Image (cartoon, rainbow, N blue to C red):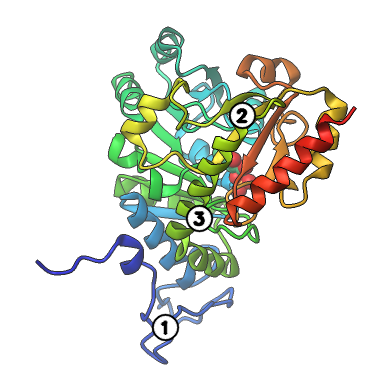
Amino acid sequence: MAYKPSTIAIHNGLNEDQQFGCVVPPIYLSSTYNFTDFNQPRVHDYSRRGNPGRDIVQKTLAQLEGGSGAVMTNSGMSALHLLCTVFLQPGDLLVAPHDCYGGSYRLFNSQSQRGAYQVQFVDQSDESALQKALDKKPKLVLIETPSNPLLRIFDIQHIAHLAHEAGALVVVDNTFLSPILQQPLSLGADFVVHSCTKYLNGHSDIVAGVVIAKDEKWAIELAWWANNIGVTGGAFDSYLLLRGIRTLSPRILQQQRNTQEIVKYLKSQTLVKKLYYPELEDHPGHQIALKQQKGFGAMLSFEFAGDELQLRRFLSALSLFTLAESLGGVETLISHTATMTHAGMSAEARAQAGITDSLLRISVGIEDPQDLITDLEQAFQVAAQR
Ligand SMILES: Cc1ncc(COP(=O)(O)O)c(C=O)c1O
């Protein structure tokens, strides 16, 4: 049988340069392209519409997720905004998770307040609440699994089936796992969205997003609108994103191994009240995660058991865990959800989503896991001092 390389090995644009034989595809910074003659444009005419580097990264992302086309955007938010712009008109309903990323929540809420479309936030694990929302015939259903920040797991195949029966299109935000650990299109989704700022780029040095479509006709429509409203990704970011994707698999697998070590350690800590990680057998989504994911990922969160002063002492004693928003980079980050990533939600909305003021979220990096555990150990000791 002929050797079949992995998808990452074959679709990353390497060795495609005919002129100089560059192994790595070059960056084309030109914003405009000359016409060969009157009314004779080349493949590209203007970089907002198309750029050779962005073409490669879009093809790579589409193939990694098993889609027919992809549009790289200048942020994860603009990827979501693009989808809503294309598929929702005033009066149309979007069904979104009640505990989605705070920025997504703010976008849908503010757009619905100005009449762009309607939104209903639903606990998608509550079958009857979900069915009630689907009975209103939404045009679009967004699934975010694992959810941010509580790592709730939703059954993509099941929700996609129900949503399709109701006549809706289904989008999955796959930012938390990447196509290495979960491929929503194969589970019935119509679109996948990523904040490429996270695992796909992996080095916390760009902000970018992508929409990947299962159906080619949607990919073409999304590309037209992305150019029309001007949300496409830039040339330099395309280059960095493609470079990041080349190491996606080893990065995320190492990050996942480190997370498993840290979870083992946190389980026995007195200042840890509740631990959220889908590998834990008492995690309500454990069985679904086993079925639909190829791994449990590298994000975890936990309720800190001390008071606010202790929490502050714990955070400032950490040295390898940077107090910062975002996730998915090679460095470990810790965030206080209520004042950082989910500050865009009202206190009531956070409470409804189960996000408390003592919740901490960790994006585990590729450092030596023992160094990370030693750092946690000394920070817990500082926090525990009276
Ligand atoms: C799950 C999820 N989706 C979307 C976004 C938005 O992406 P960006 O920050 O690239 O605009 C984020 C950002 O944190 C996220 O965590």
Q: Amino acid at mark 3?
A: Leu
Asked if disc 3 is less than 8 Å from ligand 1, the answer is no
* Residues at marks 1 and 3, CA–CA distance in whole angstroms: 21 Å
Q: Earlier in the sequence, mark 2 or mark 1?
A: 1
Q: Which residue is mark 1?
A: 23
Residue 96 image point, x, y percent: 51, 25
Q: Disc 2 or disc 1, which is closer to the eye?
A: 2
Q: Amino acid at mark 2?
A: Ser
The quarter holding residue 118 reads top right
10 Å neighbourhood of mark 3: few (<14), some, or many (≥20)? Answer: many
Q: Which residue is mark 2?
A: 268
Can residue 338 be seen at all in this image of the molecule? yes
User: Is 78 left, or right, of 12 in this rendering?
Assistant: right
Under circle 3, the secondary element is loop
Residue 201 image point, x, y percent: 54, 59
| Count of numbered marks | 3
- Ligand 1's quadrant: top right
Q: Residue at x 47, y 30 (%)?
A: 278
Q: Mark 2 and 3 residues: CB-CB less than 8 Å, in contact?
A: no
Under circle 2, the secondary element is loop
Residue 150 vertical position relative to residue 180 in the rendered view, above or below? above
Q: Which residue is mark 3?
A: 200
Residue 364 vertical position relative to residue 168 in the rendered view, above or below? below
10 Å neighbourhood of mark 1: few (<14), some, or many (≥20)? Answer: few
Q: Earlier in the sequence, mark 2 or mark 3?
A: 3
Q: Nearer the viewer, residue 83 or 359?
A: 359
Q: Residue at x 43, y 12 (%)?
A: 136
Q: Mark 2 and 1 residues: CB-CB less than 8 Å, in contact?
A: no
